[in-house]
Amino acid sequence: MARRPHSPVLDASTDPSDADVEAALAALPAEKLRAFVAAYLRGLDAPARRAFWAALVPRAARRPGAGTTKRSADATLCEDIAAFVRTATRVGEGSPAAVDSFLERATRVFLNGDAALARRAFEAMLKPLAEAEFSLGEDEMLEEVLSTPLDEVVARYLVTVYLTTPAGDRPGAIWDALERFGSVGTVLQPLAAMERAAAAPLDDLTAFAAAWATFLEGRPHGPRTGYGRDIGADRMLREAVARAHGVEGLRRLAETSGGVEAFDDWATALLAEDRREAALKALQAAIARVPSGDDQAQFADRAARVALALDHPRVAHGLLHQALRAEPTVERLLRWVAFGEPATAKIVERAREERAEVPRVTARVRGALDLLVGEYAAGAAHLAKADGFGWSDDEHAGHVLFPGLLVALVGAAAAKHLLAGIGDVLGVPDPSPWIEAPIAPLPDRDPALPVLSAPTLLSVLERTVTAQPLDPKVQPAVLAALRSAAEHRVEGVLGEKRRRAYDHAARLTIAAGVAYALTGNAHEAEGFVQQIQVRYPRHVAFQDALLAAATGSRTATAWVPRRRRR
């Protein structure tokens, strides 16, 4: 006999799999599922209900027929808000939960298609928030106190203004709306924000964009936003020009204004249309026009990627050089000298050319150039005078010169083990000691373009040091510089009790000592390390860091005796 179909067997006491959830949902008819969700929603606390509502609204707003009815089920909303505001203003404080509730009710009216009532309701609630007519009981920002996303609320309000204003008056009305409430919820791209918020496509948006762009061009500043007026004005104008006039409009705006973001948007739009030759010219125009060295360098880096995509290696190499000259960094230096997999002699030649001609470099780049051209004495002199503080600054060459001179002194193979925790610039995997956690890189906005990679300084020095070995006459100066840098670092961080840098100072001390030992000065090496240990007997955390660093080196293991615990 055939078995009857039956409901799936589900265990409510265990964590469900995706298949379990799908089976449970499939077992409920639509009406029962809606009833269950409504009942469950009523049992949630206020924050959970608001989170659920925020997830539900975008889907409910786009159901068939949404936004078409003109009837509202909340005719008393404006009166309720006015009564709440009067009371809150009188006592000086209002309930955040009540504000969230009123904004939710206004959103329901908005989704039901009553734009006029929704506009009045939003204005009634946003005005006292913008003018701080009463406190919400805490000193935090509005977005930290309220659960309702205020940026989305302001975007919905802009939609109601758009829908209830004659076409010719819309630019001024949208401006006034942003002026009034842009500080409550920040909307830097109102066209995109209104499109996302609207329950149905907005009529005549392209025509409005053209009028909006003309309106913004005639204003001395932008409307009020949470980030100030200037940021809003520039971004809003670029959005309007791109929507109304496309790539050609962005070109005119960039060439007229000379703005960094305008050039950036122009190049981005060209790349989006796969017009790489035109994008390369746009980026080159930006390099020639923008005043900031950092902006010039970023445009040059991006242009080099476009040139590589177009198979123009000579152009790319020239652009990498422009980036280096505009804003010198060790990474840009290495990228340029090692471009095209040149012979070691060519790397040294390029570095020597740059060292002789470049008018302005950071101490860190100058240190890298000294190492690449074999000017170890100059690098040692600079390191010996380096402060114990400021290793995180580009004007401190310690992270380049200390490990780089170590490589020149004892060779890359022997130095690699000592570089852990010291030579992050050299490519040794270790975060800088002043950063608690590595910062995640920004996503690549041009994923279709070749990536600009740079070799590590360590990998380049392995080649250049072999070609330019350290002169034995310079060895004492290099050893003295390593010792001096370690002493200054220990003195600096212990004097100011910078505990996060104790480990770094200890590693420098042991590395300098091992450098002495590997060059035939074992007695002086041990004496130097023990001298540091004796000089700071009460700094227990540093003593522990010194012991840990010594234990990690076979050469230095016996130099730091274990302290007796009381």
Image: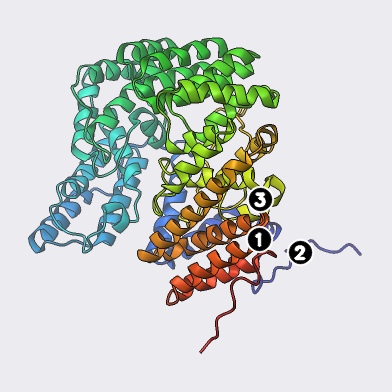
Residues at discs 1 and 3 in contact (Cβ within 8 Å): no
Q: Position of residue 367 (x, y in %)?
A: 50, 37
Task: Tell me which amino acid carries mark 1.
Answer: Ala
Q: Amino acid at mark 2?
A: His
Quadrant into which the N terminus falls:
bottom right
Position of 54 relative to 115 (above/below)? below
Are the residues tagged 2 and 1 within 8 Å (C-beta)? no
The disc labelled 3 sits on which kind of residue?
Ala
Mark 3, secondary structure of its residue: helix
Spot the residue most to the front.
473
User: How far apart are labels 2 and 1 at the CA level?
Assistant: 12 Å
Q: Residues within 10 Å of mark 1 (few under 14, many from 20)?
A: some
Mark 3 neighbour density, 10 Å: few (under 14) some (14–19) many (20 or more): many
> Which of the 4 image quadrants contains residue 297?
top left
Q: Nearer the viewer, residue 116 or 229?
A: 229
The residue under label 1 is 24
Which residue is the site of mark 3?
A: 415
Residue at horizontal 51 percent and vertical 16 percent from the top: 270
Labelled disc at residue 6:
2
- The reply to whether residue 438 is visible in this rendering is no
Q: Left or right of 215: which side holds 69? A: right
Q: Position of residue 426 (x, y in %)?
A: 59, 43
